[in-house]
Amino acid sequence: MNTNGTFIVEGGHRLSGEIIPQGAKNEALQILSATLLTEEAVRVENLPDIEDVNKLLDLIAGLGADVERHDRQTVTITAKNINLDYVLSESYVRDAQRIRGSVMLIAPLLNRYGQASLPKPGGDKIGRRRLDTHLLGLQALGADFEYDEERNIYAFRTDGLKGTFIHMDEISVTGTANVLMAAVLADGETTIYNAACEPYLQQLSHMLTSMGAKIEGIGSNLLKVQGVSRLGGCTHRMLPDMIEVGSFIGLAAITQSDITIKDVRLDKLGIIPRTFERLGIQMEYLGDDIHIPPQEHYEVQNFLDGGILTIYDAPWPGFTPDLMSIALVTAIQARGSVLFHQKMFESRLFFVDKLIDMGAQIILCDPHRATVIGMDRRNPLRGIRMTSPDIRAGVSLLIAALSAEGTSRIDNIYQIDRGYQDIDTRLRALGAKIIRED
């Protein structure tokens, strides 16, 4: 796929129809890493066909695992013969550097083979994303690591992981996943306190349990793991992507569209629907579908004491940081004002300068806070040329462009392709005017 690319977006059109969210990107990276914990076949269903997932699959295949792609959404991985020389090779370092999800390969490789390596990983440039939680957690379980400055990699070794008590110093999703995957085959009992408890972690825990792991406390921030000697194969179906669900809710509202989002797994969405309802968006829940009818106006609900609504991100079950930029764009045409407080990453709000150029009334208070003064459709946004800085900001700019008057050009759409499968094709099916240019 083209590593740059451009979307030409003709805005101002109302959309209508049904759309099905893809499989969850953030879950996929954990689940695929976990397939290396066993030499038996693991079948993964509802996998999104996106850049980040495909890069991780290439990395796993490079390690020597048999990767059988049944169709775009289904894969079977059999990690029987792993090439340990590749783990320490220049090509592995180069490929692993391109995707942050590669950090979760450490625990499976340590468990199975006693060694692993990790280059400083890539991913979104959304501020500091430290590795301490991963490294210290694995160290507590008995892994030694050292940093090779010349090659810019961390090298890990262990003579055998042993269960212990771990108090996570931050509620890291990928950090918890790594420690959990290390603990399931460690000798003895591991207690993980202050663990992340996102639906993705719950899914990983259920998958590991079906492979033979013994995990208590799934869905809470206190996990107790009794190590087992081996894990077997399984079939795992991934959740729909909650970030896509939120993205489509925001898109429907700001473009006055009539959209039904199918098969959303409402029971796993937490406070996401309620947060968008606080922006005034009407939603109808039809079984496991969400219908957003066209709305001329949507009015922000203030706090009960009359204070201006503040939306902030927090570890689950709080509002996910991946939807902060979507909610912010949606608020542009609301009636009322909202303060957005992005606590978890310090660079994720810097894309608002493009929204201001489009005519949005936004005050960027500091790297973590922005106030949106809703325009209540008095003035439409205007199309401009812009660049996608990361996955979520890229889709937020796409949503803004679809609501704008005139034509927008969004460059570097590779960032969008990393997280959203065929987003232009799927939105065109709803009536969006989007052209992809190489």
Image (cartoon, rainbow, N blue to C red):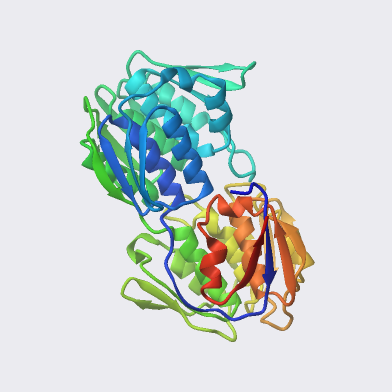
Question: Is 51 rendered above or below residue 272?
Answer: above
Residue 335: in sight, yes or no? yes
Whole-percent x and y of residue 99? 54, 38
Q: How many numbered marks appear? A: 0
Q: Is residue 297 left or right of residue 77?
A: right
Query: In the image, what residue occupies the spot 41% across and 37% down?
Result: 176
Whole-percent x and y of residue 90? 57, 21
* Front residue of 19 and 179: 19
Q: Is residue 407 left or right of residue 296?
A: right
Residue that extends furthest to the top in the rendered view of this protein: 159
Whole-percent x and y of residue 41? 26, 37
Q: Is residue 412 left or right of residue 41?
A: right
Whole-percent x and y of residue 66? 35, 34
Residue that extends furthest to the bottom in the rendered view of this protein: 296
Query: In the image, what residue occupies the spot 48% across and 26% down?
Result: 135
Residue 300: in sight, yes or no? no
* Front residue of 379 and 255: 255
Query: In the image, what residue occupies the spot 38% across and 32% down?
Result: 179
The quadrant where residue 79 appears: top left
Question: Is 115 rendered above or below residue 9?
Answer: above
Question: Is 218 rendered above or below residue 301?
Answer: above
Which quadrant of the rendered structure holds the C terminus?
bottom right
